[in-house]
Image (tube, grey):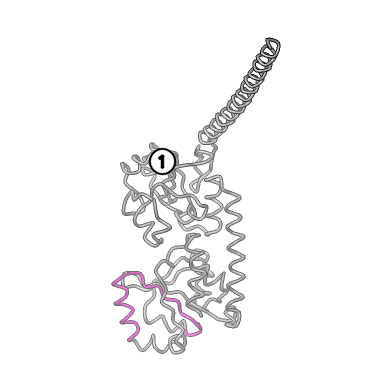
Amino acid sequence: MNKLRKSSLYFGLLLMAMILVGCNSDDAKNASAENTENAVEKEEEKLEAENVSATKMYTDALSREVEIPTNPQRVVALWTVGEILALDVQPVGSTTQLLRFYTDEEKDGIEIVGDSVIGDYEKILSLNPDLIVLYALAKEEEIEQFSKIAPTVTTQFFGEPMESLRDLGEILNKQEEAEDWIKEYNRRVEVAREEVKDLNLQDEKAVVIQLALKNMYLYRSSTFPTIFDAYQFQLSSYQEKLQQDGNFAKEQLSIEILPKFSDVDRIFLIVNDEDSKAAYETLKGSTIWNNLPAVKNNQVYVMHNRFSITDITTLDWALDEVKRLLK
């Protein structure tokens, strides 16, 4: 009987020892795994911190060599807002004027730092930006002032949209994303052309006229790439002649000049403001206007004044908008 009790006690102690060893082994494994996980997290945090703090040299639109963050995190956009948005980067701040044409969804979360193109110094300072983007027409003192807050670079005032996107891709370390965006846009252009191919737009002439502050303006065709590149409209003879001068940018038009556009098939009209709406009503009552073939054929398209800007996000929007107008 004593032997049986001793044997039971022996096996009980042995079982408890095995359980304790197993628990200790599991605890050791768990501790090892936890230590490894913590080490990985710390290494990732270290790499992320190094990534954020890393810098590079960038030559901006004014040929200034500027040291900027390799991967900017808090960008104040005082120009090229559309290009920044197209690269899936949300600026921390911009101005009312620069955001006026964007949808609520596009400008959601962007702090207003002023009304005009150049924002308010104190408001921008309060956002703690790590990069400020200005246009190339900014005054030297403005650039110097903002450079005290954060590295400040300039971009082309009136740059070709795709090149502007590539510039921002380099600034924001999003070169691959910029090229992907361009490829996708070119694909969409081909689809849009196919959808309107029955109209034979490439054989038609068009003109884009802007009404602003009661005046009429004709701009260089590169201002409206959706019309003349994406949908391949031809220039009027009058505009083609004007553009033989490489310095031609815009011309103010009078009603008396309008007969020079008698060879255009379609007129795209941008009515910029309330005063211009009244001017358009006056224009529609003039004999000269009503004698234009495009007007007689009911091929005048009043366009949203967002067409007056040429950023890349608007370019994408305009592709669908022009197709809607034509169809």
**Looking at the image, which residue is at 37% across and 81% down?**
255
Q: Is residue 239 above or below residue 96?
A: below
The region drawn magenta spans 262-285
Whether residue 232 appears in magenta in the rendering, the answer is no
Q: Amino acid at mark 1?
A: Pro
Q: Residue at x 56, y 73 (%)?
A: 231
Quadrant where the image shows the N terminus: top right
Quadrant of res 81: bottom left
| Residue 142, picture quadrant | top left
Task: Decide: is 279 above or below 249.
Answer: below
**Front-lying residue, 215 or 129:** 129
Residue 266 is a magenta residue: yes
Q: Quadrant of residue 131?
A: top left
Judging by the rendered image, the residue that carries numbered circle 1 is: 129
Q: Is residue 171 left or right of residue 298?
A: right
The one nearer the camera, 269 or 321, is 321
Q: x%, y% of residue 315?
A: 50, 64
The residue drawn where x is 52% and y is 66% is: 222
In the rendered image, residue 175, in percent from the top left (x then y), is placed at 59, 49
Q: Position of residue 318 (x, y in %)?
A: 49, 68
